[in-house]
Image (cartoon, rainbow, N blue to C red):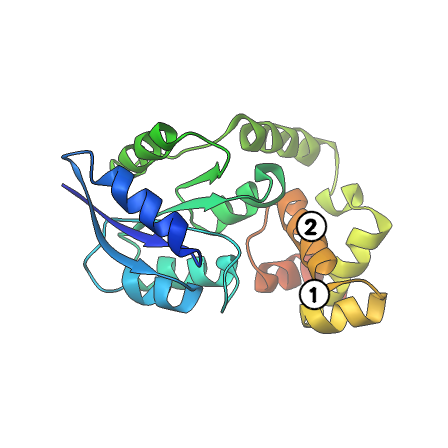
Amino acid sequence: MIRIGVVDDHAIVRTALRQHFSEHVDLRVNGEAANAEDGVKLACSGEVDVLVMDLAMPGPNASDALAEIVRRAPQVRVLILSAYPEELYGVALMHVGASGYLNKLCELPDIVNAVRTVALGGRVVSDAVAAVLRDRAVRRKEGPLHEQLSAREMDVFVRLARGEKIGRIAEGMNISVKTASTYRARVLTKLGLGSNPELTRYAVSNRLID
């Protein structure tokens, strides 16, 4: 029996997933959460084997929540289920420790298969994420990854590496918080990193900041 935790701020999504999982004898939903903070608590409860987690929810961002789960409950496999494009967020989140990333446009049987795959220790990688991984491997051979960043992405990268928060970055660049977050996701993906501290270490090691 695979014990599942469902983390999504939309009750209708949680209900649909719970009902679909209940149709399979090897799957059981053992808990639900409506925000990232409660999702971390659920993962650490000892009651779930696989956490199916949305990306955009109240509370800590998914990357921070995922990192906390990996640190405190490394035995729990995390499957990200999100409406955001895989090529922007999938690689970065899998680098942090996610076992898989699915777009919400997928079919319900795909989610069931993904849960079974990650529960057995496998990884679920879409064609889009696989393409980014291959492209990143090629670019590593060609030169420093940060040379692939656009001017705006580099600006966000340096600000993040210096410790600025997303809200302050958005204000300083005269863009929305959502746009700033998108730039952050692109930077993490292009550099193959998973968190702001890793961005800082990369920047220091490449002498991009003091």
Label 1 crowd (10 A; few <14 / some 14-19 / many >=20): many
- Farthest residue toward the front? 12
Q: Nearer the viewer, residue 136 or 152?
A: 152
| Quarter of the view holding residue 47 | bottom left
Residue under circle 2? 187
Measure the alpha-carbon separation of dots 1 and 2: 10 Å
Depicted 46 relative to depicted 4: above or below:
below
Disc 2 residue type (three-letter): Val
Q: Which mark is residue 92?
A: none
Question: Which percent across, then down, holds residue 76?
Answer: 28, 52
Disc 1 residue type (three-letter): Leu
**Residue in view at x 44 percent, y 59 percent:** 9
Question: Which percent across, then down, holds residue 116?
Answer: 27, 34
Depicted 55 relative to depicted 107: above or below:
below
Q: Which quarter of the figure is the N terminus placed in?
A: top left
Question: Which percent across, then down, holds residue 80?
Answer: 44, 46
Q: Which quarter of the figure is the C terminus placed in?
A: bottom right
Question: Can the viewer see residue 210?
Answer: no
**SS class of the residue under badge 1?**
helix
The answer to whether residue 59 is left or right of residue 15 is right
Question: Which percent across, then down, holds residue 188?
Answer: 63, 50
Q: Which mark is residue 160?
A: 1
Label 1 close to label 2 by CB (< 8 Å): yes
